[in-house]
Image: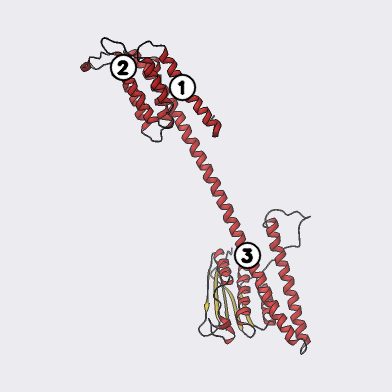
Amino acid sequence: MTPSGRYGRAVARACDLGIALVVLVAAEYYSADYDLLLGGLMALSLLARRRFPGTVMAVVLALGAVQFALSELPDFELASAPASYDVAVLFAMMSVVHHSRTTWMPYLAGGTVLLAPAAGTVGIPASGIEPFVDLQMLLIYWGLTLTVWLTAFALHTRRLYAESQAARAWHAEREQEQRVRLAATRERADIARELHDVVAHSLAVMILQADGAGSVLRKSPDMAESALRTIAATGRDAIDDMHRIVRVLREGNPDSGTPDPADAGPPRRLITLDEIKVVADRARAAGLTVDVSVEVGEGRLSPAEEMTAFRIVQECLTNVLRHAGAGAGVDIRLREERGTLLVDVTDDGAGTLAGSGVGGRSGGNGLVGMRERAELAGGTFEAGPRLGSGWHVHASIPTRTA
């Protein structure tokens, strides 16, 4: 168990104080002049073993060297060596192995503690220090040191594993949040394109029809009546599309899962290439001259591909109505070649030079929406003015035929 937060910090401080008290109490059992001082300094340095494990290890080893040097004075016994408070060396080594952030420090600490008692088996003849550790005692020291080192290394490995798992979980959570944000952004972009296609095209047709109906209301009631019928049909279709978009906003994708029959609205209207003839007829009623040619085999396109092609054609007609107005001629060509649906829409701009007057079509969301639709389908999109007057749009959409 690894406590965290304020409780974890309190437990860690209590453990540090407990270790320091163990070393200090062990030093009180010896009567040499400097045992209590050396043990107290070792205990005090162990309080910082978590933040500065390498420094604490060096300090404890230095105090241990001073302890053995004082114990070997010929006339005075100023310190006891070895002593039980030397367990501080093992605590310091354990701290280095467990808390060090470098790969070589644990091995250096373990090697140092193993070599220190080994030096006691030979002593330092040049300084008059005779061997003070026999082979049996050395083996005991080494066994205890290796036990502590392996335990600390296991704890160190477990801590690194826990940190890596926590980091992986954090990154996974951030990635999930990012995916959710990207999905929401894509959904908003899709809804924005749908709203633009529905509202812009329908309003353009309805405005032109209403203007035409007003101008011929007294002279030709039949033409005015036809225009009003077109306005009503366009409005009904727009309302159906708006209801579908609102259902997506409220309930998510209506095509996924099994909807509740009690909450189900009217069935979703599938948009196919046949709808191109409908919008072409409405554009003709608004004053355009529209020529449509669809050379695509039945069942060769998926619903998404038909939707993409229809929306591109619809947006092109909307732009012609808005920028060129009545009297413009539009040529629409759809054909399939080698697994690719080619969409070409060309207008003459009602004789207005491209890029000037009502013929200019720079900016706006229409071209951006058409490009996004084509690219989302894995295709390409090109649009630009023709030489002279008018505008040309070309889109290629790869088909997923069997």
Report, in whole angstroms, how far the alpha carbon at label 3 lies from the one at label 1: 66 Å
Q: What numbered label is drawn on residue 68?
A: 2
Is residue 266 found left or right of 183 in the rendered image? right
Answer with mark 2 or mark 1, whichever residue precedes in sequence. 1
Report, in whole angstroms, how far the alpha carbon at label 2 lies from the one at label 3: 82 Å
Task: In the rendered view, tell whether residue 374 sits above or below residue 390.
Answer: above
Instruction: Looking at this view, name the residue that lies furthest to the left.
Output: 126
Q: Position of residue 124 (x, y in %)?
A: 24, 17
Q: Residue at x 49, y 25 (%)?
A: 15
Q: Provide the residue designation for mark 3.
A: 192
Q: Position of residue 236 (x, y in %)?
A: 74, 71
Is residue 75 found left or right of 397 in the rendered image? left
Decide: marks 3, 1 in contact (CB < 8 A)? Answer: no
Q: Residue at x 45, y 32 (%)?
A: 157
Is residue 39 found left or right of 288 in the rendered image? left
Mark 1: which amino acid? Ile
Q: Is residue 149 visible?
A: no
Q: Residue at x 65, y 67 (%)?
A: 195
Q: Quadrant of residue 218?
A: bottom right
Q: What numbered label is drawn on residue 278?
A: none
Label 1 packing within 10 angstroms: few (<14), some (14-19), many (20+): some
Mark 3: which amino acid? Ala
Q: Of helix, strand and loop, which one carries label 2? A: helix
Label 3 packing within 10 angstroms: few (<14), some (14-19), many (20+): some
Decide: marks 2, 3 in contact (CB < 8 A)? Answer: no
Q: Nearer the viewer, mark 3 or mark 1?
A: 1
Q: Provide the residue designation for mark 1.
A: 19
Answer with mark 2 or mark 3, whichever residue precedes in sequence. 2
Q: Is residue 378 visible?
A: yes
Q: Position of residue 151 (x, y in %)?
A: 44, 25
